Amino acid sequence: MSARVQSAPFDLGAELAGFGAGSGAVVTFTGLVRDEGGRLVALEIEHYPGMTEKALQAYGEEAARRFALDDWRILHRHGRLAAGEPIMMVATAARHRVAAFQAAEYLMDWLKSRAPFWKREIGPDGPGAWVEARAEDEDALSRWQG
């Protein structure tokens, strides 16, 4: 059970080798940098080292408690990432598939809305605006609160 933030690319196969051994279900999600129809060349991602890892660890621990996970992993990259590159992954393992799927969705919703990352779009003409929070991400997160 771990959370990691790194600039280097990751090998999904290596990350999942042995993950969730003995569980009944393993669910993974890998996010890629979208090109937004050619409008986006790259994404610049910043974070506060130490604080970010601590927040991701707390999200993972809460998911483990809430969904009785056997294992979980969060890996998120930072730095300049070209369109098409993997930006992050979430993996969950549980006795039953419903718990593994729900835990993965829970983690994705929390990461999208609350993880302390700042993202700036880089287009063909250079850096653009920093990405702002979206109402639909907050709506997705609201289903897990309360």
Image (cartoon, grey):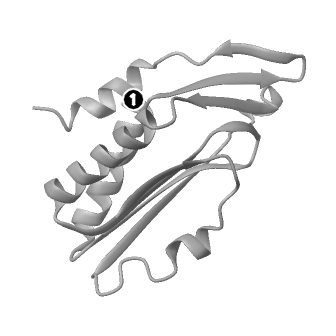
| 95 relative to 118 in the view: left or right | left
Placement of 116 over or under 73, stated as above or below: above
Residue under numbered circle 1: 113
Q: Is residue 68 left or right of residue 135?
A: left
* Residue 74 pos. (x, y %): 44, 54
For this rendering, which residue is in front, 100 or 115?
115
Q: Which residue is drawn at 54% across and 70% down?
A: 15
Residue positioned most to the top: 129
Q: Which residue corresponds to the image point at 24% horizontal and 53% vertical from the top-left?
A: 61
The quadrant of the picture occupied by the C terminus is top left
- Residue 28 percent location from the top left of the image: 46, 64
For this orientation, the residue located farthest to the left is 146
Q: Which residue is drawn at 32% across and 76% down?
A: 25
Residue count near mark 1 (Cα–Cα under 10 Å), binned few <14, some 14–19, many ≥20: some
Residue 106 in sight: no
Image quarter (top left, top right, bottom left or bottom right) of the N terminus:
bottom left
Instruction: Specify the quadrant of the image occupied by residue 73.
Output: bottom left
Amino acid type indicated by mark 1: Ser
Residue drawn at (34%, 24%) of the image:
138
Task: Give the farthest residue toward the right.
Answer: 125
Q: Where 34 falls versus 63 (above or below)?
A: above
Spot occupied by residue 109 in the image (x, y as percentages of width and height): 36, 39
Q: Is residue 17 visible to the viewer in this orientation of the structure?
A: yes
Does 119 appear above or below 69? above
130 or 27, which lies in front?
Answer: 130
Number of numbered discs on residues? 1
Helix, strand or loop at mark 1: helix
